[in-house]
Image (tube, coloured by chain):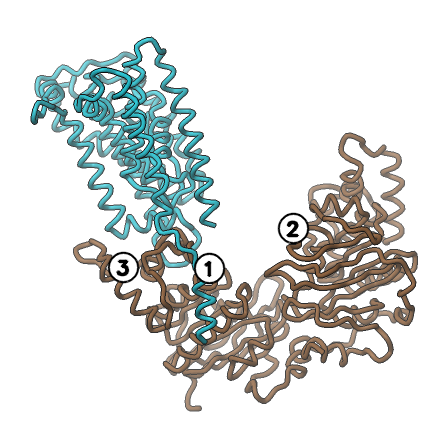
Amino acid sequence: MGTALLSMSGISKQFPGVKALEGVDFRLYQGEIHALMGENGAGKSTLIKVLTGVYDIDEGEIALDGRPVRFAGPQQATEAGISTVYQEVNLCTNLSVAENIFIGREPTKFGRIQWGVMRRRATDLLQRLELDLDVTAQLSTYSLAVQQLVAIARAIDVDAKILVLDEPTSSLDAGEVAQLFRIMRQLKAQGIAIVFVSHFLDQIYEICDRMTILRNGRLVGEHLVADISQLQLVSLMIGKELALLERLEDAGKRSFDAAPAVAQAHDLGRSGAVEPFNLTIHQGEVVGLAGLLGSGRTELARLFFGADKADTGHLEIDGKPVTMHGPRAAMNHDIAYCSENRKTEGLVEELSVRENIILALQAARGWTRPLPRRRQDELVQKYIDALNINPKDPELPVRNLSGGNQQKVLLARWLITEPRLLILDEPTRGIDIGAKAEIQRLVVELSDGGMAVLFISAELEEVLRLSHRIGVLRDRRLVTQLENTDAVDLDRLTETIASGT
Amino acid sequence: MSTTFESLQKRVIRRPQQRHIPVLATLALLCVMYGAGVVRYTGFSDTQIVLNVFIDNGFLLVVGVGMTFVILTGGIDLSVGAVVALTTMIFASLVRAGWSPIAVLPVVLLVGALIGLAMGSIIHFFDIQPFIATLAGMFLARGLCYVISTEAIRIDNALWTSLADYKIRFGGFHISWSVVIALVVVLVGAYVLAYTRLGRNIYAIGGNQQSALLMGLPVGRTKIAVYTISGVCSALGGVLLTFYTSSGYGLHALGMELDAIAAVVIGGTVLTGGSGFLFGTVLGVLVLGLIQTIITFEGTLSSWWTKIVIGALLFAFIVLQRAVARRTS
């Protein structure tokens, strides 16, 4: 393969409290499409930002064309021939297509912009990409997919040697992805090296030559795509770490077919978020959702809560069709949603534990009927004890609690409303093992008590341990639902996520 | 491959004249107003009526040009009226002190530029909302007027009076120097917006400041530049106002910033930035001037009807812009 166009070796990058990258090597050859793989927090975006000059590195060496380089900013990286197209299109949609390609380096004569020259050059450039656009039209008149391609045109106009595409396909449909891939192959044939980041495994296998896999800031491996199966890839990305958790009773084996259905989704879907799916959640049942990041787990759950509006299908609660007009409506149907992001979507950090816990109940009652203070204290004390929230002082600001205890406060807020369907989105992420175990035990207790639970977690062990039934998502589609019997274990589940069957 | 290409093309929605719609609406409104005036009042069809609108509003046009630059970036400049007043004050007091008006001219333009530069720098470097920064500038400039004098100062200068009263005649009609100056400013401004990098950067920042930054455009420099331009335009507007009033006074141009903003918005420039034309601002000023003319012709109506009509028009145009923006997205 000759010498690498770009070689990064022993790259380390430390942020306060986190080692984002630790001794990572990365090599890129001319004319290859290279996938950068890893779950969230694996260090992909940090590595990309190092490559594009946004971050400086603490340790390691970067060599471009065999010469050591060090970028002080994105501008320098661009000048060295490294162009980046980010997930969100960073263009000005109020300007014309031609301007978006050339702005900042318009052809000028005596300070006057030569519009004719600019239009011609833009047309030529787009024609080389086999794109037939009216370059004088405002960019906003074109679809997001075309805008993305214009962004790529802008990126390669600066004689790019390396093109970094950070999740360019996340909002494109199949036809548009094919269009993008055609252009990527063309650029590859011209000798441009492409770094491609995507959560869609099929796309990686379709377009990429080699891949580098990261996990927890470390290099896991560098492979030819042809040499590694999807199953191997997924297990390398997720890793199988032995959990030091207390063993819970096997949750499965109960049959819920006879139990009344709390919520039933019929062809429920939202374009761009999750394809239409059917899912029934029975009383006392824990339905787990498994899938890689970006596979549509959260998006599916949000449709149940009405946080996003479905554009196809309908939802039945207790066998009666309902339209979810938003979280308030869902709360009226006794559905509670514990969001993934407790900092920005859940807790009010300045308020006390007590105030945070009663928030949802108070909202459900309406603000004109305040909950008596005695009743508040009683309820709050009950849940602080039940969930073992530490410290036990209800008047402490939530900000002062640890992550695990904050999560329990959030949980208490929803439990206090006595929901019949509880949606838990990553309830154990980023909390310590003890708190994790307590939350898991609580889920089991609640479902034994008859509550229906929709449980989302990136940790497959956890999903396996708690769920009676597991819905597997892949590329924003609910591909299958597995009864959690003895036949289903970690390998089987990993394989399902990887292959879709 | 051809099928994907077609599917791609199908998603392309073509509405070429979209960004021209608000300006065209203003043009249509202007024609309707003028037509109604001609039908209703005798003597309204005299071309001199239209020229008088220009003569009476030359200073507003110049101030409006600066305001258009600022609003195109998504900002706002509330200080313009106060800077106009301060300019008339400095101008009048220096002339009274024996300076030649020609020597005073660069001084007041420099003062306007410095005030704009200061506000722009504060907005950029301290990341302050333009509303607050220019509000502070407004109070500052208005206050400085009274430091110079609490009374109105007459401008008694033969040269200046002759310049102000000079009528450029052609074919039975006449305009004043202020009209010529205002139109030159409009043309220069339009050229800058359409044919220079500064102009295109202004549109880009108004469209999406974050993107402009990531595309490597000089966002900070451009933002400071537009407030400086607005300051210079306000100072020049103040000079033209002295043609009109022959005096400097701290109470001149009260609320002119709002007239300027109204003219710019009625002219089709979107308040959030990124879309609009100087030609629209010219139309906007003409609409405001024509309303005043019609109310003068009506005779019995109170002049406050001007404000009521302007208010109604502003509402109409903001709603129109919203409708156009919705259809685009």
Query: What type is the residue that disc 1 sits on?
Result: Ser
- Whether labels 1 and 3 share one chain: yes
Residue at 45% x, 66% y: name it: B8
Chain B representation colour: cyan
Q: In brown, which chain?
A: A
Q: Is residue A132 left or right of residue A351?
A: left
Left or right relative to A182: residue A13: right
Do the residues bearing badges 3 and 2 touch, measured as CB atoms within 8 Å?
A: no
| Residue B105 drawn above or below residue A101 | above
Q: Give SS at disc 3.
A: loop
Q: Which mark is residue A272?
A: none
User: Disc 2 on helix, strand or loop?
Assistant: helix
- Residue B151's place in the image compared with A474, above or below, is above
| Residue A346 percent coordinates (x, y) | 70, 49
Tags 3 and 2 both on a single chain: yes
Is A120 on the left or on the right of A226, as rendered?
Answer: left
Asked if residue A76 can be seen in this view, the reply is no
In this figure, which residue is indicated by the disc labeled 3?
A: A106
Quickly name the residue at label 1: A143
- Percent x, y of residue A484: 84, 73
Which amino acid lies under the numbered mark 2 shown in the image of this protein? Thr
Provide residue A63's location: percent of width, then percent of height: 42, 79
Q: Nearer the viewer, residue B283 or A383?
A: B283
Q: Amino acid at mark 3?
A: Glu
Q: Quarter of the image holding residue A73?
A: bottom left
